[in-house]
Amino acid sequence: MHKDHIRLAVVGATGAVGTEMFRILEQRNFPFASLRAFASERSVGKTIRCKGKAYPIEVATPEVFKDLDIALFSAGSETTKLFRDAAKKGGCLIIDNSSAFRMERDVPLVIPEINGDDIKAHKGLIAVPNCSAIVMLMAVCPISKLSPIKRIVVSTYQAVSGAGAKALAELEEQTQDFVAGKQPVAKVLPHQIAFNLFSHNTAINEAGYNGEEWKLIHESKKILHNDSLAITATCVRVPVMRAHSESVNIEFKDARPTLEHIHKALAEFPGVKVVDDRENNYFPMPLDASGKDDILVGRIRNDISNPKAIDLFVSGDQLRKGAALDAVQIAEYLVKNDLF
Ligand SMILES: NC(=O)c1ccc[n+]([C@@H]2O[C@H](COP(=O)([O-])OP(=O)(O)OC[C@H]3O[C@@H](n4cnc5c(N)ncnc54)[C@H](OP(=O)(O)O)[C@@H]3O)[C@@H](O)[C@H]2O)c1
């Protein structure tokens, strides 16, 4: 299909990821012949702007997909499950931000800078990985090319917008209440988030890991095509508006690469920016990562407790590279390679 003929849609257009999607489509001047914006009945009457035009929010129904070529989904797992078959029947390719189908064998799970070529095997649905996995792997991938990795230990500091637009509003509301001397009330997230932090708000499984940790571990192996990679994770929600940060310990199978080589590999990797100023104690921060495409990487140092390991700290905008940008990059790859 010629790129000027693409009939594009965003499903979940009013959400935290969806609104970012429209910004990115405009900023990257993504080619489309038509664009439609879908959400739930709650949003009918609203509009969203892209490339100087206002698009009315429409209610998504199974029938709409026969008139679409690509749909960028960010409306939660249940919505993707609801419309997957209708999209397939209608000949509309789904790029999905939810976790509904990520681990299915015939669904490519893609970070274009890392495993873009997996897109070629798509069967009508391509999944965007978990946002914490994307932020971590953008730093891990260039390092893994220097020397094979044996084990990763990661701890996350995850922004509230990762839990959606309502959670973001809740942090603002609770902060105002706290400052005004009122008791903050938790309605969206399970605990008070203002001036607090807590273990990620996903259910704990039989192994004792929460859902976010489980996704980070298993999706990373799928993306890197490396089932034998050992990973453990602790995921925590922090009172930050936007951009996830992560402390990452990487143990190599053999001797660790030099810090100089690691700096160089990271600096040369597209989508990564090294922020590692020891003299001024200036390292990746979520405020600096917010609204940016690059994943910031710093605190790059040898692990003094293990001669084969290093430590680093990353911050990345989970609404952009961790979700909307990754989805649009996948769509760009499809267009560039004539793959739909
Ligand atoms: N937030 C992040 O940082 C992030 C990162 C990576 C992946 N994700 C994933 O992306 C998805 C969206 O997350 P979000 O944070 O953007 O959530 P959100 O802010 O809560 O937005 C959800 C969106 O889905 C829409 N929606 C709900 N039910 C629908 C239906 N039946 N048909 C059509 N649209 C429907 C909502 O419309 P209304 O406004 O009308 O309710 C809204 O536009 C989730 O699967 C999430 O796990 C999020």
Image (cartoon, grey):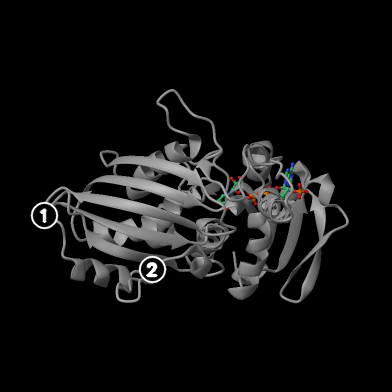
The percent position of residue 232, horizontal first and vertical second, equals 34, 39
Which residue is pictured at 41% across the width and 41% down the height?
234
Give the side of residue 220 with respect to residue 304, left or right.
right
Q: Amino acid at mark 2?
A: Phe
Q: Mark 1 or 2 closer to N-term? A: 1
- Dot 2, how many residues are within 10 Å of its Cα: few (below 14), some (14-19), or many (20+)? some
The percent position of residue 123, horizontal first and vertical second, equals 51, 45
Give the side of residue 279 with respect to residue 39, left or right.
left
- When the figure is inspected, residue 44 is found, relative to residue 289, above or below; the finding is above
Q: Which residue is mark 2?
A: 283
- When the figure is inspected, residue 89 is found, relative to residue 242, above or below; the finding is above
Give the side of residue 284 with respect to residue 15, left or right.
left
Q: CA distance from mark 1 to mark 2?
A: 26 Å
Q: Which residue is mark 1?
A: 255
**Screen quadrant of the C terminus:** bottom right
- At mark 1, the secondary structure is loop
